[in-house]
């Protein structure tokens, strides 16, 4: 039980002045992130190696994932031409498969494999990345002034002094709203994954590692893992499409 | 003045078990009642589909009853968990039991009510469309399982308190941590459990009316439920911070007030956003089922609305972190 | 019975010597403690209303968009205005809680 607290103090708690080992670099997270990336690369390389007319099982799985996300991205962004939708498709698909495998890696029964998503630094950086891309796309499609005008609230464009005055109220609200998106999107994933792993640790200790934790593993790793990976991906996609429109 | 340690122990056990069983049973009772009521209506409308409706109702009630079973288990543990050091039982022990009781009581309340919505909607949908029984039942069980995860978080915090936080004596800081963590996860799980159940209920009534849009509706439901649970995650994070990373909390009444105040802020602050996101998710899932071709537009509106309604939960989290770290 | 007496009674029951600060709760301590719990109650209960209200607005907007998708922009804008207005009570709670914590304790 003690190492749970250690994990929290080491690299999670904001506002503390506790020195982080390795200068704030969590070796386990970096290692597991690299393992995830290499595994993904190998799997997709194997799946896409032989592009046959009648797909084998590996190719079928890869085609299924790619096809599902192609449709999802296209229906969310709703551009006229196919190519414009394809621009964000690699980002969204890669985000989903990366998060999925990261959430699943904790299932491997050694102490060296921990979910990279159970580290707030991973989820926070992914959340900041998503919001930065969304902001950039918003500025690209509407212009910087247009983007700022949108932050000034829905009544800014209307004529009259009242619309301009309402910006005093709406601008701070929208800026806080944009920042709170980062907090909520990254803390949701982080909290779910670390919550599941702590629950499994606690119940394993209480039941002396008997059968119960396997059922919890099935729920918290496989079910919650895929749902949360999908929620994170969908939210990033939604924020991007809101930024563009 | 001398007080028998047995009496102190008894105070804690009775107070904690009262919170756990009293609050924890209410939710599941309401939820099961909703399921039974709508199954009655359905049987009245379509008496020949009685057996499939009865089966769906019983499955829904069995799955939806598990929050109250969590509350029962933790309540019995509160009553009968062995005290490690009976000679030095004091305020810490009472606070630990009360914290565990608050956690599991409030936490299972919300999920219990929440699990009733999909069960009721499933029975209603079967009355309209009895041939879709297996699909409706499977989506209902998925929705209920997701709606129960806040209750599971609360149960685990209660178990951590019961088995790893039995400290002898009376310390302000330890009492504050126990009660604060219990309120943070308990009240924090109430709204999300409720709201997540409402989302599942909306999806179920949508699938009951328009069974063809089953796939997109399931997707909208899962995304909506995942977003609904954010306030519970905030509560759980604050509870974990208190339990595992607050060893240097000042040991006087101010430290006690800090921990309890942070727990109240993030716990009760999560009720509204949780239920509100649930209302948004309910309408979103229903609208998706009605017009499956608009799923992206509706999902986008639903997510924006949920994100805005959760900003108050983020304010509450900020106040809790300010209380714990800055002041 | 105030907190101090309760604490003394509990400690007497345990048979411990009251060596911590518990025995010497001053008025200032009580005031600070009250301010902290008060800030928690202020933000916690203050967040209930806006959360439910904004969710209600979002739900109605979803239904309306499902019915008339061609007005999606107008409906989203109206939803955001309504939510911003009902958000204001949450902001009041936040401001009052921060005032309690940083100014009035």
Image (spheres, coloured by chain):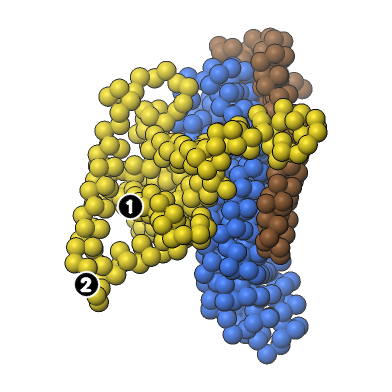
Chain coloured brown here? C
The answer to whether residue B42 is left or right of residue B162 is right
Q: Is label 1 in a helix, a strand or a loop?
A: helix
Q: Residue at x 72, y 82 (%)?
A: B43
Q: Which mark is residue A52?
A: 2
- Chain ID for label 2? A
Q: Residue at x 54, y 46 (%)?
A: A244
Could you tell me how far apart the alpha carbons at marks 2 and 1 are, in whole angstroms? 26 Å
* Residue C81, visible in the rendered structure: yes
Question: How busy is the neighbourhood of tag 2: few (under 14 within 10 Å), some, or many (20 plus)?
Answer: few
Q: Which residue is mark 1?
A: A101
Question: How far across and how far down the image is residue B217, in percent?
Answer: 57, 66
Residue B11 versus residue B257: which sits nearer the camera?
B257
Q: Colour of chain B?
A: blue
The answer to whether residue A119 is left or right of residue B299 is left
The image quadrant of residue A124 is: top left
- Chain ID for label 1? A
Q: Which mark is residue B54?
A: none
Chain coloured yellow here? A
Q: Quadrant of the N terminus of chain A?
A: top left
């Amino acid at each position: 039980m003690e190492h749970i607290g250690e994990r929290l103090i080491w690299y999670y708690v904001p506002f503390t002045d506790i020195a982080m080992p390795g200068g704030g670099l969590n070796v386990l997270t970096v290692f597991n992130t690299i393992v995830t990336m290499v595994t993904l690369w190998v799997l997709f390389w194997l799946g896409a190696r032989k592009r046959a007319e009648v797909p084998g099982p590996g190719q079928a799985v890869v085609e299924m994932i790619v096809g599902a996300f192609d449709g999802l991205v296209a229906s969310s962004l709703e551009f006229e031409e196919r190519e414009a939708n394809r621009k964000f498709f690699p980002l969204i698909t890669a985000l989903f498969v990366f998060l999925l495998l990261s959430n699943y890696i904790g299932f491997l029964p050694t102490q060296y494999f921990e979910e990279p998503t159970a580290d707030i630094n991973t989820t926070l950086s992914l959340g900041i990345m998503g919001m930065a891309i969304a902001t950039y796309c918003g500025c690209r499609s509407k212009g910087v002034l247009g983007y700022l005008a949108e932050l000034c609230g829905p009544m800014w464009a209307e004529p009259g002094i009242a619309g301009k005055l309402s910006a005093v109220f709406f601008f701070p609200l929208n800026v806080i709203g944009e920042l709170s998106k980062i907090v909520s999107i990254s803390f949701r994933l982080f909290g779910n994954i670390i919550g599941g792993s702590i629950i499994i640790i606690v119940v394993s200790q209480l039941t002396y590692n008997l059968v119960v934790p396997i059922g919890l593993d099935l729920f918290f790793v496989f079910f919650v893992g895929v749902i949360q990976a999908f929620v994170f991906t969908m939210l990033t996609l939604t924020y991007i499409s809101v930024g563009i429109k | 003045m001398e007080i028998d340690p047995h009496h102190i122990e008894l105070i804690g056990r009775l107070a904690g078990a009262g919170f756990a069983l009293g609050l924890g049973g209410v939710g599941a009772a309401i939820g099961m009642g909703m399921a039974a009521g709508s199954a009655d209506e359905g049987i009245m409308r379509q008496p020949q589909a009685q057996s499939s409706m009865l089966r769906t109702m019983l499955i829904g009630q069995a799955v939806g009853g598990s929050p109250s079973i969590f509350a029962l288990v933790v309540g019995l543990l509160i009553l009968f968990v062995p005290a490690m050091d009976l000679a030095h039982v004091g305020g810490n022990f009472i606070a630990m039991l009360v914290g565990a009781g608050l956690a599991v009581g409030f936490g299972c309340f919300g999920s219990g009510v929440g699990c009733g919505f999909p069960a009721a909607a499933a029975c209603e949908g079967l009355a309209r469309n009895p041939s879709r029984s297996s699909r409706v039942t499977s989506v209902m069980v998925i929705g209920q399982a997701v709606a129960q995860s806040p209750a599971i978080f609360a149960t685990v915090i209660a178990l951590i308190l019961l088995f790893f936080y039995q400290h002898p004596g009376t310390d302000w800081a330890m009492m504050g941590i126990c009660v604060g963590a219990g309120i943070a996860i308990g009240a924090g799980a109430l709204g999300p459990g409720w709201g997540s159940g409402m989302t599942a209920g909306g999806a179920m009534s949508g699938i009951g009316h328009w069974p063809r849009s089953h796939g997109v509706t399931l997707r909208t439901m899962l995304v909506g439920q995942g977003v609904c649970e954010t306030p519970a995650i905030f509560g759980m994070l604050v509870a974990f911070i208190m339990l595992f990373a607050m060893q240097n909390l000042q040991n006087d009444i101010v430290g006690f007030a800090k921990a309890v105040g942070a727990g109240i802020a993030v716990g009760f602050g999560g009720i509204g956003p949780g239920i509100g996101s649930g209302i948004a998710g309910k309408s979103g899932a229903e609208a998706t089922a009605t017009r499956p071709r608009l799923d992206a537009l509706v999902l986008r509106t639903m997510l924006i609305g949920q994100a805005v309604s959760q900003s108050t939960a983020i304010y509450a989290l900020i106040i809790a972190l300010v209380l714990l770290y800055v002041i | 019975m105030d907190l101090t007496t309760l604490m003394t009674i509990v400690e007497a029951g345990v048979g411990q010597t009251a060596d911590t600060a518990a025995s010497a709760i001053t008025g200032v301590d009580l005031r600070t403690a009250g301010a902290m719990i008060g800030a928690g109650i202020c933000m916690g209960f203050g967040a209930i209303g806006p959360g439910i209200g904004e969710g209600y607005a979002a739900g109605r907007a979803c239904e309306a968009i499902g019915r008339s998708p061609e007005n999606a922009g107008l409906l989203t804008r109206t939803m955001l205005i309504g939510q911003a207005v009902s958000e204001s009570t949450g902001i009041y709670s936040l401001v009052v809680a921060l005032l309690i914590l940083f100014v009035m304790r």
